[in-house]
Amino acid sequence: AQSVTQPDIHITVSEGASLELRCNYSYGATPYLFWYVQSPGQGLQLLLKYFSGDTLVQGIKGFEAEFKRSQSSFNLRKPSVHWSDAAEYFCAVGSNDYKLSFGAGTTVTVRA
Amino acid sequence: NAGVTQTPKFQVLKTGQSMTLQCAQDMNHEYMSWYRQDPGMGLRLIHYSVGAGITDQGEVPNGYNVSRSTTEDFPLRLLSAAPSQTSVYFCASSYRTSSPYNEQFFGPGTRLTVL
């Protein structure tokens, strides 16, 4: 069975600073990897996804993620955060039977 | 398109009561699923469906029933509510093709409290 670990429960970053959120996955086959964002009181929105090809993936809102097979990681990055990036971020791994397994999430706080 | 809609947004139940959480999508998606979200645990899959008339269990199915009589609707039933079912419930849908790579679209959630 697949699983996802997000080591950081909470990250605080200054507006304009860079952000990196860590994600490690466990899956026996080639993984389908996703990052979702959840704003307070809202549902989840897809930021980006990866299955194959270029290991650096661009997403919406200026986010990117890099797949590193040797480290079983799929870390999310943004060069310069905005106050509107304050949210909870979830990494997920999908399997061939269409099931998604989510990490516990990382809450990002942006300070002025 | 309304996307994925869920009703109600909030619900308070007493232990032992039953209720149905509604989920509907207007995108003609074949795949639909229910998750529960609990603090520090992310989202966990309860049940899912790959098409009308087909359902299957996810990671935490106990205490929940589902059915899929139409493509659009995927209700989640709590037969006898327990305090452990206090959670936020999300419904999601996606196209089902030969690849599970498709984006899942999430509803706004239902916040359920069981006393």
Image (cartoon, rainbow, N blue to C red):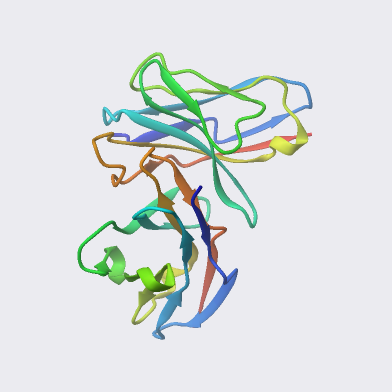
Residue B56 percent coordinates (x, y): 48, 26
- Visible residue check, residue B74: yes
- Visible residue check, residue A38: no
Closer-to-camera residue (B1/A50): A50
Q: In the visual, does A79 lie left or right of A52? A: right
Q: Judge whether B70 appears above or below B12 on screen.
A: above
Closer-to-camera residue (A94/A88): A94
Quarter location, residue B63? top right
Q: Seen from this angle, which residue lies furthest left?
A: A53
Quarter location, residue A59? bottom left
Q: Judge whether B71 appears above or below A18 on screen.
A: above
- The residue at the point 41 percent across, 19 percent down is B54
- The residue at the point 36 percent across, 18 percent down is B52
Q: Judge whether A98 appears above or below A111 on screen.
A: above
Q: In the visual, does A29 lie left or right of B28? A: right
Residue B75 percent coordinates (x, y): 49, 23
Residue B60 percent coordinates (x, y): 61, 36
| Quarter of the image that includes the C terminus of chain B | top right
- The residue at the point 21 percent across, 68 percent down is A54
Q: Seen from this angle, which residue lies furthest front?
A: A28
Residue A94 percent coordinates (x, y): 40, 48
Count of numbered labels shown in the rendering: 0
Q: In the visual, does A64 lie left or right of B13? A: left
Closer-to-camera residue (A109/A106): A106
| Quarter of the image that includes the N terminus of chain B | top left
Closer-to-camera residue (B94/A45): B94
